[in-house]
Image: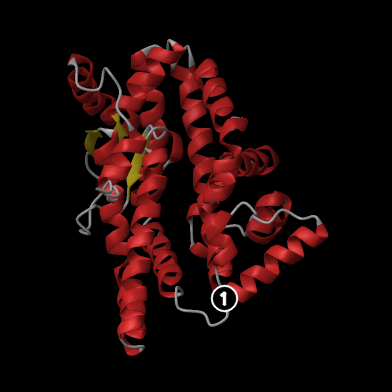
């Protein structure tokens, strides 16, 4: 009798694992504290950024499996239009096309679940711009087992570490809720990316040529966009660059605000920052980051922070706020690499 292959949910749970303190009284104390900490962080972020945060943020403290399920549900809503288009085109090809579409869907579900299972062991907090239900709203989510594990492993002061993580996520909420056009702009980019996904005749041959050419020229087969970048169409590459530019600015801005407020109020901020930087740059995860495309995500923190600090040093913090005046005020990837170019254009 052959062993049944694990479905996406079982695979995720197996990869994500558990944490011994996740179901003890430590978790329930964490749930109570994060409500209070998040409210305080929202007030601090509003003062530091000048962005208004409407209402009190909804807070969720989840375990690793719940975090994965929430993200899987969100992806399902975002990807639904593209899946429908691809299914229609495959159906036109007859039974073989429908079978191929079903197989591709199952493969994508398993791969996504595996990736999220790995990430579920690392994520501390997340600002959810799109709810798992697909409805409008926003939630600040914290992965309880990971917060508890980091505090215990590195002997962080819990009250300070929790505030520090909350500051970063509340800065993202300020960016998307305090800037009237930001949410729609971001979701439009995601929609463009999703709708650009379509069957490409000769894609496998194109990718094979790219791999062979890269090897012959001594270049890496995968860039920071990972496997997705390898198979992406030229149109998708254009959209990826725009999304990356936006997220680099938002992550950099969030990181500067987080560290600056932390330095003012948290005695252990410098050590916490040092530990998380080394965690992001851990060479043991380098291969996984490159393969999954998360290397691009890791670079966003450093490149974005460098851009924000360079703009501030050249023209002051008020000039940084110009980023949030209109979509055209956002920098391109090339301007992020050369902040003075952005200053000449916008400021």
Residue 20 appears in view: yes
Q: Position of residue 227 (x, y in %)?
A: 55, 57
Q: Position of residue 204 (x, y in %)?
A: 57, 73
Q: Residue at x 36, y 88 (%)?
A: 93
Drawn side of residue 72 relative to residue 291, left or right: left
The quadrant the C terminus occupies is: bottom right
Q: Residue at x 48, y 57 (%)?
A: 325
Q: For the residue carrying disc 1, how many other residues have a C-alpha within 10 Å: few (<14), some (14-19), or many (20+)?
A: few
The quarter of the picture where residue 101 lies is bottom left
Q: Which residue is tagged 1?
A: 203
Q: Nearer the viewer, residue 287 or 244?
A: 287
Q: Is residue 141 above or below residue 146?
A: below
Q: Nearer the viewer, residue 341 or 192?
A: 192
Q: Nearer the viewer, residue 17 or 167?
A: 17
Q: Disc 1 on helix, strand or loop?
A: helix
Residue 53 appears in view: no
Q: Position of residue 273 (x, y in %)?
A: 53, 23
Q: Residue at x 36, y 78 (%)?
A: 86
In the rendered picture of this protein, how many numbered marks are placed on residues?
Answer: 1
The quarter of the picture where residue 122 lies is top left
Q: Is residue 309 above or below residue 162?
A: below
């Amino acid at each position: 009798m052959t062993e049944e292959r694990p479905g996406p949910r079982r695979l995720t749970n197996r990869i994500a694992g558990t944490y011994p303190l996740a179901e003890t009284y430590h978790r329930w104390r964490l749930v109570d504290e994060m409500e209070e900490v998040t409210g305080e962080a929202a007030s601090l972020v509003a003062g530091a950024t000048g962005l208004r945060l409407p209402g009190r943020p909804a807070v969720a403290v989840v375990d690793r499996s719940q975090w994965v399920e929430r993200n899987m549900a969100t992806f399902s809503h975002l990807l639904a239009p593209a899946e429908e288009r691809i299914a229609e085109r495959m159906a036109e090809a007859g039974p073989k096309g429908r079978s191929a579409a079903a197989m591709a869907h199952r493969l994508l579900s398993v791969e996504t679940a595996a990736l999220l299972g790995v990430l579920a062991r690392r994520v501390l907090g997340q600002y959810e711009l799109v709810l798992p239900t697909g409805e409008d709203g926003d939630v600040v989510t914290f992965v309880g087992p990971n917060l508890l594990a980091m505090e215990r492993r590195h002997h962080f002061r819990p009250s300070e570490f929790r505030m520090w993580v909350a500051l970063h996520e509340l800065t993202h909420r300020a960016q998307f809720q305090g800037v009237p056009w930001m949410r729609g702009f971001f979701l439009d980019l995601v929609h463009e990316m999703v709708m650009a996904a379509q069957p490409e005749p000769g894609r496998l041959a194109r990718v094979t040529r790219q791999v062979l050419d890269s090897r012959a020229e001594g270049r890496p087969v995968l860039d920071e966009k990972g496997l997705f970048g390898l198979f992406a169409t030229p149109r998708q590459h254009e959209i990826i660059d725009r999304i990356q530019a936006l997220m680099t600015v938002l992550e950099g801005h969030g990181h500067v605000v987080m560290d600056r407020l932390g330095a003012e109020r948290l005695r252990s901020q410098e050590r916490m920052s040092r530990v998380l930087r080394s965690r992001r740059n851990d060479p043991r995860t380098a291969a996984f980051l490159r393969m999954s495309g998360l290397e691009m995500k890791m670079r966003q923190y450093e490149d974005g922070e460098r851009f924000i600090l360079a703009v501030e040093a050249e023209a002051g913090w008020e000039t940084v706020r110009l980023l949030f005046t209109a979509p055209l005020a956002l920098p391109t990837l090339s301007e992020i690499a050369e902040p003075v170019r952005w200053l000449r254009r916008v400021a």
